[in-house]
Amino acid sequence: MFNMKCIYSIILFLSFQLTYLGNAFAAESQAELVAKMNALIEMGRYQEAYALGQTGLFDYEGEPNFDFAYGLAALESGRPDEAVFAFERIAFTNTGQQRVRLELARAYFLSENYAAAETLFTEVLATNPTQNVRANIEAFLQLIDQAQSSFDSILNFSLSINAGTDSNINSATELGVIDTPIGDVTLSPGGQKINDSFTAYTGNISYTRPIDKSRNITAQANYNLRNNHVTDQFDLTIWSGQAGYNWGLNSNLRYSHALRLQLVELDKKKFQNSATFLNSLQRIGSDGWSQSLTGAYTMVRYATGQNPNANLRDINQFLVSGVITKSSNRNQLSISIFWGDDSIQNSIGKNNETQFVGLALADQYLLRPRHLIYGRLSVQMNDHGAADPIFNVTRTNNTSSASLGWIWQLNSNLTVTTDFTYSDNESNIDLYSWDRNRVQTGLRVLF
């Protein structure tokens, strides 16, 4: 019969044997796993190698041979962040292994940690590697320089001048006499359709400052002057400025928020000012598809200097629009739908309150290098909130528009533009029915 001391000795011996066999088995299993992963990597089956590595991650994480194979599989299967962790584990204890440092630098680059990638590539380059390795490193350093330059601030400035004719510069009826409930009214020349030629000047300055790879801030200012050659009464000047913040969850989904201020002058006299807050969501899909959704809230205020009752037209407007776009190599087609509500601020002017809905179809086509043609069709239906005080009828308007244009890019800084636009507004009150056509051509210079 065994005594207790003998039993303890047997147990201790068996435990030593089991430990030895377990270690030997683990070592053999790790070597087999790494060998299988390397074989898959050599065949370019990186996803399978990564999946196989996942089965041994808990047991072998921290083992240099396993970490290197796992890092390669992760890197080549599109998981650079996981590759960074694997290669960093090796580099921490094996600082002199050039291959590990190169693969870690590549993982940093693909995970867009350009500063770390540049530092590591430069360190390896300083060790005087072979010509082939040197050439690869220099290529990566050039790509890093290009990527980092994309985070530089951008300032653009442009000027343009256009000349053309407009058959109805004041969007007025062509009728000379209007039938009203109180009798016929003869319109003054300023209340009728006016045909004139014009020259238009535009200045634009824009600034973009990246914060990081997914965020940036923007600012822009615009000046537009349209000078009618005969009738100064309807000369139009528009000053506007906008500041925005843009960010994205990823490269396919982006958000933007902006504040826009605008001042409109007629014949150099203040006519209207507005403030708009915009929020937009844009999604870039596959195969050239993209979608966007925008909501805007605008406060419009009219100047009372020339007309004491002008503030009866003050509104707060809410607008929602959605756009679907399909792009190909030479063509871009988009369709948009929009809905808006103008909430009047003075109940006396309820007849100026409107709700509207519209649809637009736009297309642009690259006819040949540097020559782009485009077209746009739109319709909009407006319903006013109360009866017109003169005609005692609630006004409805249906507005349609068609445009056709051509852009000729002479060089990277100079562009020639030509376009024709026809608009027609049909109203149940004759005073507000009108049509107009406008043609213009001009030059745009980008500095």
Image (cartoon, rainbow, N blue to C red):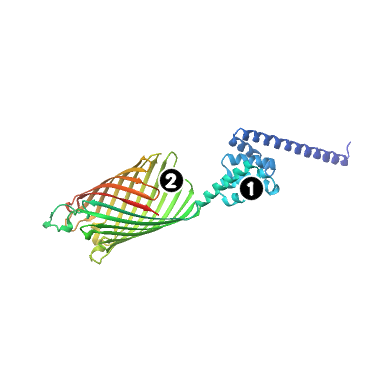
Residue type indicated by callout 1: Leu
Q: Is residue 313 left or right of residue 7?
A: left
Q: Is residue 418 left or right of residue 26?
A: left
Identify which residue, 143 or 209, lies in the foreground.
143
Sequence order check, earlier mark of 2 and 1 = 1
Residue type indicated by callout 2: Arg
Image height of 274 relative to 128, above or below: below
Q: Position of residue 9 (x, y in %)?
A: 86, 40
Identify which residue, 318 or 93, lies in the foreground.
93
The image quarter containing residue 364 is top left
Residue 254 visible? The answer is: yes
Name the mark on residue 438.
none
Instruction: Tell me whether the residue at label 2 lies in contact with that at label 1, contact meaning CB atoms closer than 8 angstroms.
Output: no
Q: Which residue: 23% across, 64% down?
A: 309
Q: Position of residue 203 (x, y in %)?
A: 35, 57
* Residue that mark 2 sits on: 283
Image height of 60 relative to 264, above or below: above
Q: Is residue 230 left or right of residue 210?
A: left
- Give the structural element (helix, strand or loop) at label 1: helix
Q: Position of residue 380 (x, y in %)?
A: 27, 48
Image quadrant holding the N terminus, namely top right
Image quadrant holding the C terminus, namely bottom left
Q: Which residue: 32% across, 48% down?
A: 417
The image quarter containing residue 243 is bottom left
Tell which tag, 2 or 1, sits nearer the viewer: 1
- Give the structural element (helix, strand or loop) at label 2: strand
Crowding at dot 2, Cα within 10 Å, few <14 / some 14-19 / many 20+, comes out as some
Q: Which residue: 25% across, 67% down?
A: 305
Name the mark on residue 125.
1
